[in-house]
Image: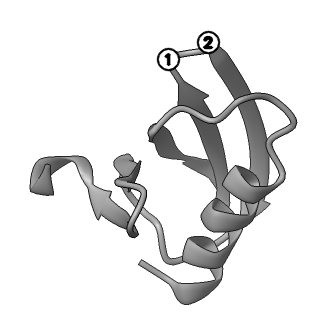
Amino acid sequence: MPLEICRLLWNLIDELKIEKDYLQIFELNPIGEGIVEIIHKQEVPEYEASIYIYNEVIKENKKIYAIDSVEYSTLMFSYEY
């Protein structure tokens, strides 16, 4: 995962204006010509937003979780959970 995308995901969490759930979900979906849709979700309270970025590295769909355990936070692919 490119470092700039990891930073972007953390920034999206930091900039949330609502109460943050301990689990943040990101879906990265390449939609062609280097454009990637990032869908940011959480369950409680319910939230979903999308942004579009230019990135030629991400070629397939990816799901990423950010988990806050109070002491530390972890960013991981869904298959690592």
Q: In this view, does 31 lie to the left or right of 57?
A: right
Helix, strand or loop at disc 1?
loop
User: What amino acid type is highlighted by mark number 1?
Assistant: Glu
Residue at image location 12% in from the left, 57% down from the top? 80
Say above or below: 5 vs 32. below
Judging depth in this view, the residue of 58 and 25 nearest the camera is 25
Quarter in which the N terminus is drawn: bottom left
Q: Which mark is residue 78?
A: none
Say above or below: 43 vs 67. above
Residue occupied by mark 1: 43
Q: Residue 46 carries which label?
A: 2
Which quadrant holds residue 8?
Answer: bottom right
List x then y, in percent, for residue 4.
65, 83
Residue at image location 50% in from the left, 43% down from the top? 26
Which quadrant holds residue 47?
Answer: top right
| Whether residue 22 can be seen here | yes
List x then y, in percent, for residue 5.
60, 73
Q: Which colour scheme is used?
A: one colour
Instruction: Report crowding for label 2: few under 14, some 14 to 19, many 20 or more residues within 10 A (C-alpha).
Output: few
* Farthest-out residue, bottom: 3
Q: In this view, does 79 lie to the left or right of 21?
A: left
| Whether residue 34 can be seen here | no
User: What amino acid type is highlighted by mark number 2?
Assistant: Glu
List x then y, in percent, for residue 71.
38, 67
Which quadrant holds residue 70?
Answer: bottom left
Q: Do the residues labelled 1 and 2 touch (CB within 8 Å)?
A: yes
Q: Distance between the residues labelled 1 and 2?
A: 5 Å
Q: How many labels does the image show?
A: 2
Residue at image location 62% in from the left, 12% down from the top? 46
Instruction: Report crowding for label 1: few under 14, some 14 to 19, many 20 or more residues within 10 A (C-alpha).
Output: few
Judging depth in this view, the residue of 40 and 71 nearest the camera is 71
